[in-house]
Amino acid sequence: MLDVIVIGAGQAGLAAGHALTQAGLSFQILEASDRAAGSWPHYYDSLTLFSPARYSSLPELPFPGDPERYPLRDEVIAYLENYARYFNFPIVYQARVRQVQRDGKDFVVSTDSGQSYRARSVIAASGPFNQPNIPAFVGFSEFAGTVLHSSAYRRPSDVSGRRVAVVGSGNSAVQIADELAQTHQVILTARQPPRFIAQRPFGLDLHFWLTRSGLDKLPLGDWFNFQPTAPVLDHGKYRQAFASGQTFESGQANSKLSYRPLFDRITATGLQWRDQLEAIDTLILATGFINSPAYLDGLDGLDASRAAKQRGGTALYVPGLYFVGTAWQRSNASATLRGVGPDATHVVRKLQRYLRTGSASRFGLRQFLPACCN
């Protein structure tokens, strides 16, 4: 029987594989697709990393090429696939996990193909990026136009009509809105306007300062279950694009890219702010993701949402279940290429303790302590 089943062979699963190898534990990685690239092949074509190659590596294998450049999506895919080959992890491809169940103290992980795998513990490394968050906006079901989540967006030529609204104010929302503004009339709408932060303060990338100061990996998620809204990293391009755009007056757009506060409701033909109506052909939801894997539903009698509750990568209610790659799992870097490695090492240390003792240290009084202190 295996010590660990890892679900997912994206950046988080590969980082977990490295940490498990270093710990000398037996494991199998189950990957739903036919490649070790996670969600990256499904992102939009023009996606560019917000961190330089120097700060975009998994453990023990630097990202190739100029360390100061900002890699493109396809470069990341190639890097991840090479990482899996380089370390020769035991990966089963086209093994989409259908359900994780308990059999005594052990876990039984079943796939859509009918195969089952047994292990003493499980690391869920499938990440949140395959579960789009779709808010229940008033009037949403009435909209007759095209609706896309940002995870389904690929390129401007695929977007129907001329008038587009992008909902959200994070990095992806701003990048998609700016790209679409070259060919479409675009409104960016959100509860708060984008907060821009310089990509290269004092001539050095922000990640240099975050790494040098230690802020990038400060375990705020351990201490406070903390998840602030991330600012938009900008070389100046995006701030200028929005600054040059005009606001909407009398319901008429007078620029190709504008920001408006979040609408009051969605109508059949567009968006409504009080008594103003703006016609929209396509609505793109850059509204993030949720981390509630369907395969955890029913585990230990819990629904998927409760089973997925974790602190510092340790499940709060399911002994032997761990996570790598969730946003703000421990720090600002947790769901990034540079952050999954340290998080995986931290989680595997917890997992080893569980395998030795047969119980998770967070129970009893320790459940009230920060995960970093357990």
Image (cartoon, helix red, strand yellow):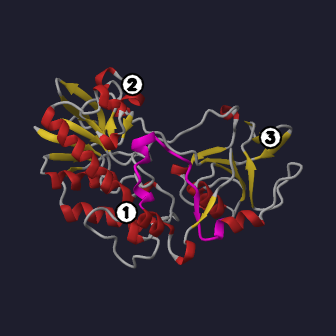
Give the numbered dot on residue 273: 3
Tell which circle, 1 or 3, labels the residue nearer the N-terminal end: 1
C-alpha gap between disc 1 and disc 2: 33 Å
Is residue 365 shown to the viewer in this render? Answer: yes
Coordinates of residue 93 in the picture (x, y in percent): 25, 49
The residue that label 2 is drawn on is 303
Tell which circle, 3 or 2, labels the residue nearer the N-terminal end: 3
Q: Amino acid at mark 1?
A: Ile
The secondary structure type at the circle numbered 2 is: loop
Query: Viewer-proximal residue, 95 or 20?
Result: 20
Q: Which residues are magenta?
A: 214-238
Q: Amino acid at mark 2?
A: Asp
Quarter of the figure with residue 171: bottom right
Coordinates of residue 292 in the picture (x, y in percent): 42, 35
The secondary structure type at the circle numbered 3 is: strand
The residue that label 1 is drawn on is 77
* Residue depth check, mark 1 versus mark 3: number of the one nearer the observer: 3
